[in-house]
Image (cartoon, coloured by chain):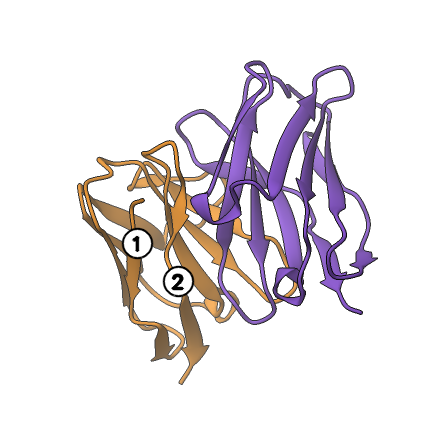
Chain colours: A purple, B orange
Amino acid sequence: QVQLVQSGAEVKKPGSSVKVSCKASGGTFSSYAIIWVRQAPGQGLEWMGGIIPIFATANYAQKFQGRVTITADKSTSTAYMELSSLRSEDTAVYYCARETTGRGYSLWGQGTLVTVSS
Amino acid sequence: DIQMTQSPSTLSASVGDRVTITCRASQSVSSWLAWYQQKPGKAPKLLIYKASSLESGVPSRFSGSGSGTEFTLTISSLQPDDFATYYCQQYNSYSITFGQGTRLEIK
């Protein structure tokens, strides 16, 4: 059974960076797109960007360009999302999700709460 | 970027009702449209992919239709477990977009 397991909750100061991991266990990792989605408290889902590990090239939502970096380590089946220059508005639950090609995103991590507070 | 607009934002309904949620894209996404259900504190759950294909394990009371720019999610007979928030998502372009969500609440 394939699972995506994310790293634990983080509390960060404004201006700092956070790096969240997403480890795939029990199945294929490299061939499928991994995306990162965030959800601020009481708000909707917001796509941040994604990567297909076998190609190693990420694409990002325009809103996060220059602030987010998505990478993948095929050797450990782990994807990473790093967000820099954090501000209070970045307080949110961050999810990773894996596509089954053409069939939407059926596999989701459990979410990682990132709190940005001075 | 492709914008996705869902309606209504909130829907009040009773157990047994048939409900429909609409999602409109600002430009054609062909059939690359998915629907998700989300409950508080949980990750989204895929219900429908490619506009009308039912994800494995999802009850058949859920159905999707549409192509191009107009899509619908229909729940044929609401069950207590269905009260949640629903999101559409286009995955046609290199840039993914979600609708703003429809909260389905008990009347």
> A89 left or right of A26?
left
Q: Give the percent coordinates (x, y) of residue B103.
A: 43, 71
Q: Is residue A23 above or below residue A37?
A: above
Q: Is residue B10 above or below residue B72?
A: below
Q: Give the percent coordinates (x, y) of residue A21.
A: 74, 38
Q: Residue at x 53, y 33 (%)?
A: A50
Q: Chain of mark 1?
A: B
Q: Is residue A26 above or below residue B96?
A: above
Q: Nearer the viewer, residue A5 or B73?
A: A5
Binning the other alpha carbons within 10 Å of mark 1 as few (below 14), some (14 to 19) or many (20 upward) gives many
Q: Chain of mark 2?
A: B
Q: Are marks 2 and 1 on the same chain?
A: yes
> A25 left or right of B28?
right
Q: Give the percent coordinates (x, y) of residue A112.
A: 72, 52
**Quadrant housing the C terminus of chain A:** bottom right
Extreme residue toward the bottom, this view: B107
Q: Residue at x 37, y 76 (%)?
A: B10
Q: Residue at x 59, y 18 (%)?
A: A56
Q: Are marks 2 and 1 in contact (CB under 8 Å)?
A: yes
Task: Indicate the amino acid at tag 2.
Answer: Gln
- Please tell me whether mark 2 sits on a helix, a strand or a loop: loop
Q: In the image, which disc is placed on residue B4?
A: 1
Q: In the image, which disc is placed on residue B101?
A: none
Residue receiving disc 2: B100
Q: Give the percent coordinates (x, y) of residue A22.
A: 71, 36
Instruction: Name the N-terminal-most of marks 2 and 1.
Output: 1
- Please tell me whether mark 1 sits on a helix, a strand or a loop: strand
> B91 left or right of A33?
left
